Image (cartoon, rainbow, N blue to C red):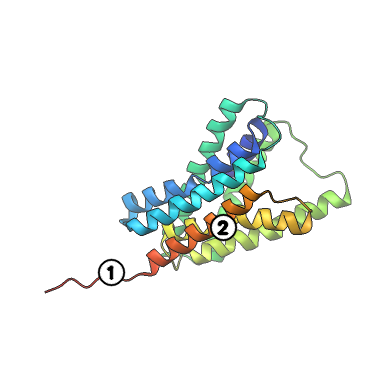
Amino acid sequence: LDLYCWHMGVKLTSVANSTTLANLAQVFVVAGAWLLFRETPRRLFLVGLALALGGVWAMAAAKGGGGQGASPFWGDIVSLGAAVWYAGYILVVHRARADLGPLRIMIWTSLISAPLLLAASLGTHERFLPVSAVGWLACLALGVVHAVSQGAIAWALGRVPAATASVVMLLQPVFAALLGWLILAEALVPMQAAGGLAALAGVALAQFAAARKPRAESA
C-alpha cells in the first residue's frame, strides 16, 4: 500500500508535494513508537526531527516538480496515505525484529506484497512487462537496490529505536539530490543545498539526542 500510494501520488500531484507529504512518515513513526512501544522521544530529538523535516521540505519546495499534476487534491491525500502506510511498515518491521531475522522478514514481506502489487498493476491497466533489454536491466537493478536497502532497514530496526531509524531515513532525499547532481548533472539551487544541510544537521541532532544517556537522578 505504501508503494502503491507513493507512485499514484507522484502521478496525481507535484513532485514537491508528494515528496514532502511522504516524508511525514517520520512523524507518524515517532507517534506510533510512543503509543505502541512506549519509546518516549526526548525534546532534543523532536527538535532534530523538526529541523530535518524542514530541510526536506525546503529541498522539495525548491525543486518545484514541473507542475501540479492531474489532480492535486487527491494526489496530496494519496501521498499522505503513503506516509501513514510507510510508518506502519517501519513499526511492524521493528516489532518483528524482536523474533525474526532481517532475511526472513524480507522474504515474507516480498511474498505477501508481490500478489497485491500484481493485482494493483492489472487493475490500473499498466504495462506489466518491459519491452526492451534496457527495461529488463532497469527492473533487475531496481530489484537489487530495493532488496539491499530494505534489508538494511530491517537489520537496523532490530538494533535501534524505530523513531531513530526513521529520522535517519530523512537522508534519502539529500543523497538523491546529491547523486542527481553527480550522475545526472541536475543542478542544485541554493535553497536545495541549504535544505540538505538543515536535514543533515537535524539527523545529527536527533542521533545525538537518542544516544544520550538519561541523567542519573539525585538522591
Measuring 70% from the left and 60% from the top, which residue is drawn there? 144
Q: Which mark is residue 197?
A: 2
Say whether residue 91 is visible. Answer: no
Q: Residue type at mark 2?
A: Leu
Asked if residue 209 is positioned above or below residue 114 in the image, the reply reads: below
Q: Is residue 19 visible?
A: yes
Q: Residue at x 48, y 64 (%)?
A: 204
The residue singled out by tag 1 in the image is: 214
State the SS at label 1.
loop
Comparing marks 2 and 1, which lies closer to the viewer?
A: 2
70 shown above or below 182: above
Amino acid type at mark 1:
Pro
Within 10 Å of the Cα at label 1, are there few (<14), some (14-19), or many (20+) other Cα atoms? few
- Residue 131 lies, in percent from the top left, at 86, 43
Which picture quadrant has residue 12?
Answer: top right
Q: Is residue 149 left or right of residue 129?
A: left
Give the SS element for disc 2: helix
Q: Nearer the viewer, residue 81 or 132?
A: 81
Vertical position of residue 117 compared to residue 208: above or below: above
Above/below status of 95 relative to 69:
below
Coordinates of residue 172 in the picture (x, y in percent): 60, 55
- Considering every residue shown, the one lying at the far left of the view is 219
| Residue beneath the point at 65% across and 50% down | 190
Q: CA distance from mark 2 to mark 1?
A: 28 Å
Q: Quadrant of the C terminus?
A: bottom left
| Res 14 quadrant in image | top right
Identify the residue at image location x=51%, y=37%. 81
